[in-house]
């Protein structure tokens, strides 16, 4: 084996360190993915805690409602609601997955709420007074749910859903100002009835 010069040793050392750093980052990027893909694995515990720093384009979403493992998950940029549901263990028995847009792109900080059959029946069986109990999630609201809010009719509700789908979701209520049919007066009433 020929003797290596000092500069060659430095170059080889730098390459080795770079490869180790890249490998460590890949292993550390998604600590909960292996557990999520393998199922509960007997652990049955809470999802792995995530830090929100240094994402490389990743988004962090809160998946709740009728899923097997509700929690906060880091997802790759461009992921869809259906991907977040799968990461949370899939829909739980009694989930009404038809009530949400599973094809919508995820945005950072978004809450994905998968409704349960009892919740959906209560919302469908009652009129606007029952719907007025709490804020509606912009990330999963249907045209019918948005139509129950004062100041939003069926056309504006459809415009909101289309805008959300075209822009990969809504991260704040303030983004509704860009939707056709919503003015400053309507925005004031929406802030109390909607959540991102």
Image: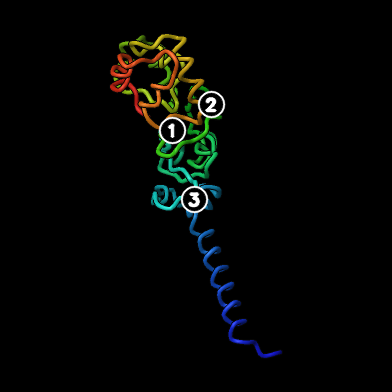
**Which quarter shows the N terminus?**
bottom right
At x 46%, y 38%, the residue is 68
User: SS of the residue at dot 2?
Assistant: helix
Q: Is residue 16 above or below residue 108?
A: below
Which of the 4 image quadrants contains residue 179?
A: top left
Residue of label 2: 166
Decide: few, some or many residues near mark 1? Use Cα within 10 Å; few <14, some 14-19, many ≥20: many
Q: Is 49 in front, or is 125?
A: 49
| Viewer-side residue, 58 vs 95 | 58
Q: Residue at x 41, y 32 (%)?
A: 171
Percent across and percent down for residue 55 are 46, 50
Circle 2 packing at 10 Å, graded few (<14), some (14-19), many (20+), is few
- Label 1 vs 3, first from the N-terminus: 3
Labels 2, 1: front one: 2
* The C terminus - image quarter: top left
Q: Is residue 135 above or below residue 112?
A: above
Q: CA distance from mark 2 to mark 1?
A: 17 Å
2 or 3: tag closer to the N-terminus: 3
Q: Which residue is mark 3?
A: 56
Q: Which residue is mark 1?
A: 112
N-terminal of the pair, mark 2 or mark 1, is 1
Distance of mark 1 from mark 3, alpha carbons?
22 Å
Proximity of marks 2 and 1: CB atoms separated by less than 8 Å: no
In the rendered image, residue 38, in percent from the top left (x then y), is placed at 55, 50
């Amino acid at each position: 084996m020929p003797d290596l010069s000092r500069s060659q040793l430095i170059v080889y050392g730098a390459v080795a360190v770079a490869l180790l750093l890249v490998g460590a980052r890949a292993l550390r990027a998604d600590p909960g993915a292996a557990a999520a893909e393998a199922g509960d694995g007997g652990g049955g515990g809470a999802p792995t805690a995530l830090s929100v720093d240094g994402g490389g384009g990743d988004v962090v979403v809160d998946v709740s409602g009728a899923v097997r493992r509700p929690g906060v998950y880091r997802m790759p940029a461009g992921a869809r609601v259906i991907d977040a549901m799968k990461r949370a263990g899939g829909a739980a028995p009694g989930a009404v997955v038809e009530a949400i847009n599973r094809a919508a792109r995820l945005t950072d900080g978004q809450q994905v709420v998968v409704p349960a059959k009892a919740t959906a029946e209560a919302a469908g069986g009652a009129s606007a007074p029952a719907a007025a109990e709490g804020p509606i999630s912009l990330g999963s609201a249907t045209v019918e749910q948005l139509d129950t809010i004062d100041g939003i009719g069926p056309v504006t509700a459809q415009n909101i859903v289309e805008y959300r789908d075209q822009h990969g979701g809504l991260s704040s209520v303030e983004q509704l100002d860009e939707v056709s049919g919503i003015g400053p007066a309507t925005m004031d009433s929406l802030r109390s009835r909607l959540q991102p």
